[in-house]
Image (spheres, rainbow, N blue to C red):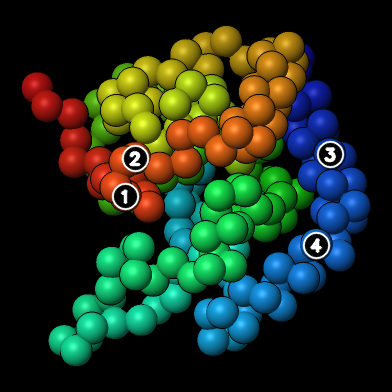
Amino acid sequence: MYKSFFKRTIDFVVAFIVLLAILPIFLLLILFLGIANDGKPFFVQRRPGENGAVFSIIKFKTMNDKKDARGNLLSDCERLTKVGSFVRKTSLDEIPQLLNVVKGDMSIIGPRPLLPQYLELYSDFQNRRHEVKPGITGWAQVNGRNTISWDTKFELDVWYVDHISFLLDFKIIILTIKKVFFREGISQEGQMTMEAFKGTKK
């Protein structure tokens, strides 16, 4: 009953209330990030959700679009703006995803939505992460986030799918707050983002 009905109801109510409560902060971040990114405060990208259905995820844009002399984007570290660095370290870049939750594309808790090109690389077991709505945070995020291997991340995602409950979701919320406060597991050493998934080695 929780998975099929109450989870969605709680997601909608909580996301809507939080958006109203943080509206001033939301607007300030739009202003500062808009200035830092040439009028582009948001990062929008296509991601697969429940049952692999693709939707547009929205986040705050933490990196600019500066390119080298050949027209190639500079490295993540070179494009990360000062305000973007703060927003990323405090996980404020995730706030706009509350709009995805209100819309119904995402849940507050669930496996993180990855890239569409990964869909053809998943094993049947790994693809089970799409049996539920993706989340802003999830079991893998509170157990290592970007510092764990892809295989471990997918094992944690599928474990969550098989064990969804209100108490588990509440535990993940508490652990997420702790992770954000101590800024744990934001990125792998020497990288701003996790390396691309290339499929599981057989």
Mark 3 surroundings: few (<14), some (14-19) or many (≥20) residues within 10 A: some
Disc sitting over residue 25 in the figure: 4
Mark 3 is on which residue type?
Answer: Val
Mark 4 is on which residue type?
Answer: Ile
Mark 1 surroundings: few (<14), some (14-19) or many (≥20) residues within 10 A: few
| Mark pair 1, 2: CA separation | 5 Å
SS class of the residue under badge 1? Answer: loop
Quarter of the image for residue 169 reads top right
Q: Earlier in the sequence, mark 2 or mark 4?
A: 4
The reply to whether callout 1 and callout 2 are in contact (CB within 8 Å) is: yes
Quarter of the image for residue 136 reads top right
Q: Earlier in the sequence, mark 3 or mark 4?
A: 3
Q: Which residue is mark 2?
A: 188
Residue extending farthest left: 202
Q: Is residue 25 above or below residue 73?
A: above
Q: Earlier in the sequence, mark 1 or mark 3?
A: 3
The reply to whether callout 2 and callout 4 are in contact (CB within 8 Å) is: no
* Whether residue 173 can be seen here: yes
Q: Which residue is mark 3?
A: 14
Q: Which residue is mark 1?
A: 191
Mark 1 is on which residue type?
Answer: Gln
Mark 4 surroundings: few (<14), some (14-19) or many (≥20) residues within 10 A: few
Mark 2 is on which residue type?
Answer: Gln
| Mark pair 3, 4: CA separation | 17 Å
Residue name at image x 12 percent, y 27 percent: 201
